Amino acid sequence: MPNHSARHSARVHTADDGCFRMRVIGSELLRVAAVAVLVGNFVIGTYQRSPVHTALIGGYLAVTLLSLFVAARRPNAEWRQPLFVLADAVAILLMLFMHAGQGPLDHGHALTPPGLVVVFVLLINAALTSDARHVVRFSSIVFVGWMSIIAAAVANTGLGFSEALIDAEVQRELGLALSFGVTALAVYVIVREYAETATAAEAARRRGSNLARFFSPTVVDQLAGGENLQLQRRKVAVMFVDLRGFTSFAESAVAGQLRHMLSEFRDIVSAAVVRHGGAVDKFLGDGVMAVFGHPAPRADDADRALACAVELVGELEQWRKREEAAGRPALRAGIGLHAGTAMAGVLEAGCHSEYTVLGDVVNVAQRLQAVSMSVGATLVVSEELKSAAKTIGTLTAWRNAKAVTIPGRKLPLDIAYV
């Protein structure tokens, strides 16, 4: 199961990297398009050309080539996007000043259509970063600078405030600047909404990935959707699996041995639990607690729990023999299984909320696991579990014991063991 999770994570990361590369490539292509528009405007434009035009185009071409180089070498550098978005904004302001700030507002000095295209192309480029902060920085610098340039150009004409407002050329420039501002606001809202949606989707994906390590697919869907999580009473089957002699082993074992043993043990148990439609409630050091019947109760919860436990008897013994054959430390396991009514769901506890199962059924299952050693068995099940399971007699040959004393419990229990 961990290998499956690793492959799933690898596929997700590969897809994420692919999307990121596409955004980076798209961003750089938009800068190339902006340069192409500037060059075209310079070649076929009707305004009077000057060294300023050449310097602007050459400078922005250098910025574009630099951004291409950095994107290829350091695509994940945190400073890359803020730096070049700022460079885009500065280039826009220089272009606006070149067109509207060097003379009276007339057709010879107004912003030409190709130049207007560059403004909106680079706004789209800021949006491609998927970061609303970059959109705010770019659009704020451009909008404030644009309005300032218009105000400076109006001041050069000597027009009063009221006269400027009714001047056709001023109205056109103000209209373009305000159109940019409204468009930038709309782009900001879209990018922010996209970012929030993407964040929520990533959180849901990670939550689903974490849940998938311990729950069956049908249970994961319910948990991820927020269903059946409230603490409530219900019939469940609870299983405890524990490694015998682990405490003594841990006193002298090296870290690598402990890590290997616990990892293998947990993988085997949790994989079996998920295969049988159960859920790993928690890991308790060298023990595993699993529950069948929550959050998705089924009529055959007891049967599936019993089938899982019987399967684990064989799997854990095979694992022990493999470890011994490989010359590694190997321990036997004990399993306790009980059925009854429990409180199951999410237990709120301040900053930490836990999905768990509580009640006497849990305590009894844990005690039965301890009883397994005293009766010389690997698996011990209660009479309640036997009564609830329809397949108890078909899975294996059972030995029975009546009125067995359970540590920490006043009333004895009838049990079956193997």
Image (cartoon, rainbow, N blue to C red):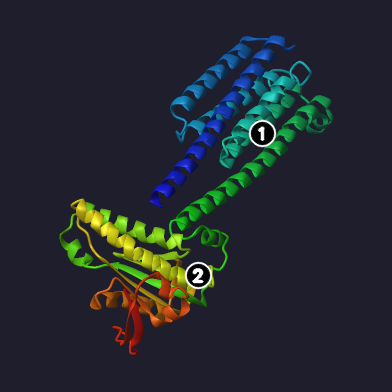
Q: Amino acid at mark 1?
A: Phe
Neighbour tally class for label 1: few under 14, some 14-19, many 20 plus, Cα within 10 Å: some
Which x, y percent locates residue 35?
Answer: 61, 19
Disc 1 or 2, which lies upstream in sequence? Answer: 1
Q: CA distance from mark 1 to mark 2?
A: 57 Å
Q: Is residue 348 left or right of residue 155?
A: left
- Residue 348 visible at all: no
Q: Residue at x 54, y 21 (%)?
A: 64
Neighbour tally class for label 2: few under 14, some 14-19, many 20 plus, Cα within 10 Å: many
Residue 412 lies in quadrant = bottom left
**Which residue is under mark 1?**
143
Is residue 415 shown above or below 256?
below
Is residue 26 shown above or below 61?
below
Q: Residue at x 82, y 33 (%)?
A: 162
Q: Amino acid at mark 2?
A: His
Residue 90 lies in quadrant = top right
Q: Residue at x 71, y 37 (%)?
A: 183
**Which residue is under mark 2?**
294
Q: Residue at x 64, y 32 (%)?
A: 124
**Front position among marks 1 and 2:** 2
